[in-house]
Image (tube, helix red, strand yellow):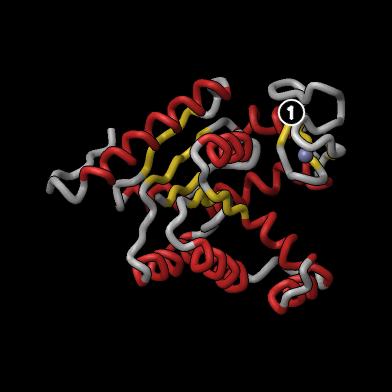
Amino acid sequence: MYVLFLGPPGCGKGTQAQHLAETNSFYQLSTGNLLRAEIEAKTELGQKMETLYASGKLVDGDLVLKMVQKVVASEGAKSILFDGFPRTVNQATAFGSFLQSIDKKFDCVFSFSLADSEILDRISGRMTCADCKAVYHTKTNPPKTEDVCDKCEGKLVKRTDDSRESVKLRLEEYHRETEPLKEFYKKENVVFEIDASQSIEAVSKQISNEIEAISKYKGNKEKTSGTYSRR
Ligand SMILES: [Zn+2]
């Protein structure tokens, strides 16, 4: 099963992705983490990207697409949760053709919505584990010990791009580049809307119920010719 989490920065999809990966053994494909891993491993792709970073340019969409396709090919039949990719309609179109070529598609696109003002408040409290990349929040999802990761005891750090000004810029970019993906996937009838102002528990329950419904549908698909209709 392939699912995509689509939503603005700070809507809680990182936390939900982490949770779903743990509870339903999804492989979590986060392009941010992949990029860092490629750079650390000094692969050809990684070195190209490091050069781009150093020159202050945005990472080329084609390189990201190549990197993701490499991972999807190597993960094979596993369930994959796509977090942060595709980011633009162009990327989604190119990646859609790739998926089609291996006889796959997104089974569900979870579309998270949250007001910009709420996002700005949320992001200012966000922390990430420097080692395992687990995500925490000073108010909504605090670690048991201050600044220490519950899972691996790594140090929790604030991302430098989490300042208010930088978040505003990322939100503008999201509305312009990424939000149109919602309409794009609506045409494929795979969008499941999430009101991200709900509690973490309520959102994760909605997601797991939907995943269960899709699993059931996929399991029955061979036996019946019925069409799965999304509510
Ligand atoms: Zn950790």
Q: Nearer the viewer, residue 24 or 111?
A: 24
- At horizontal 58% and vertical 49% (from top left) the residue drawn is 174
Q: Which residue is mark 1?
A: 137
Q: Residue furthest left?
A: 225
Q: Is residue 85 above or below residue 46?
A: above
Q: Is residue 165 left or right of residue 68?
A: right
Q: Secondary structure at mark 1?
A: strand
**Residue in the foreground of this view, choosing between 133 and 118:** 133
Residue displayed at 53% across by 67% down: 74
Q: Quadrant of residue 70?
A: bottom right
User: Which of the 4 quarters of the picture holds residue 56?
Assistant: bottom right
Q: Residues within 10 Å of mark 1 (few under 14, many from 20)?
A: some
Up-down relation of residue 139 to residue 218 (above or below): above
Q: Is mark 1 within 8 Å of ligand 1?
A: no
x then y, percent, for residue 48: 73, 77
Residue drawn at 70 percent across, 42 percent down: 168
Residue 187: x and y in percent read: 30, 52
Q: Identify residue type, mark 1.
A: His
Judging depth in this view, the residue of 157 and 92 nearest the camera is: 157
Q: Residue at x 14, y 44 (%)?
A: 226
Instruction: Say whether residue 159 is visible.
Output: yes
Image quarter for residue 193?
top left
**Where in the figure is residue 121, as x and y percent of width and height?**
71, 28
